[in-house]
Amino acid sequence: MTIRDKHDLAGMERVGAVVAETLTATTAAVEPGLLTKDLDEIAAEIYRRHGAQSAPTVEFGFPGHILVSVNDEVVHGIPGERVLAAGDIVTIDVTVELDGYVADAARTLCIPPVSTEHEQLSLVGEKALQAGIEAARSGCPVNDIGGAVEDCVTAGGFTVIRQMTGHGTGRAIWEDPMVPNFRQPGQRARLHEGLVLTIEPILTSGSDEIYEADDGWTVLTQDHASAAHWEHTIIITDGAARILTN
């Protein structure tokens, strides 16, 4: 969507704040021995308090309030009976609907003892997110974002999972434009002031080949290498992009 007036801006600020609160609370709770469904219950309580909903549940029937992906799970992990363990790398992805507005953010964290690979994978993902946000300015090509992300991930020694992209958002989870995490030949779209979109580097320590689990939701790396995922929802301005979900 494109922000048209103060009403749109206020709506996006409200939903972005709920996403940020949920992501902060759930990531703070991560520890060995916790069930992933316990994280989901934390999110559910925050949603109830704000009158918000899980956007993936509303739009697609996803069986959870948040998405929790562990180790070789790339995205869309279903919260359930899985027990988090020492040494896991965990991504929490929060997408909220509130009063007709949608915002989305994700964060990857590592449970001690942290391997060098996991530490660097998460760190490079966070740096790639920052690089993508810095490249997102009105009038610039969408490709500038993907190029910044790709360069950062490649320099860090990791691989962009190309099948997963950022995207416009605001009234639905996925809106135009798509925002690849790499330079896309022929991509001519440009960013404009007021555009709401997500930037979300998704990377792995192995191959970018992925597959969908039998549950119909969880996406995993084909070679079972670990993955990381960092994301914010932003508004394009005539200067630095504004982050709605921090």
Image: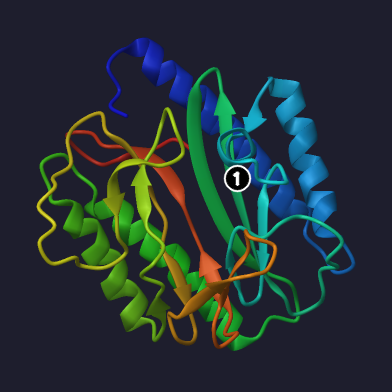
Question: Looking at the figure, which quarter contains the N terminus?
Answer: top left
Residue located at (87% from left, 61% from top) = 81
- Which residue corresponds to the image point at 80% horizontal and 32% vertical from the top-left? 45
Question: Which of the two residues, 211 or 154, is positioned nearer the viewer here?
Answer: 211
Q: Where residue 192 appears, x then y in whole percent?
A: 17, 35
Asked whether, in this view, residue 239 is left or right of residue 128, the answer is left
Q: Which residue is drawn at 36% across and 75% down?
A: 153
Locate residue 26, reporting x and y percent: 73, 49
Residue 197's place in the image compared with 81, above or below, is: above
Q: Residue at x 37, y 65 (%)?
A: 128
Vertical arrangement, residue 172 with respect to residue 112, above or below: above
Q: Name the residue beneath numbered marker 1.
A: 94
Residue kind at label 1, given as amino acid type? Val
Residue 19, how many percent across, how many down?
A: 58, 37
Q: Is mark 1 on a helix, strand or loop?
A: strand
| Residue 246 showing in the rendered view | no
In the rendered view, does 15 fall on the left or right side of 131?
A: right
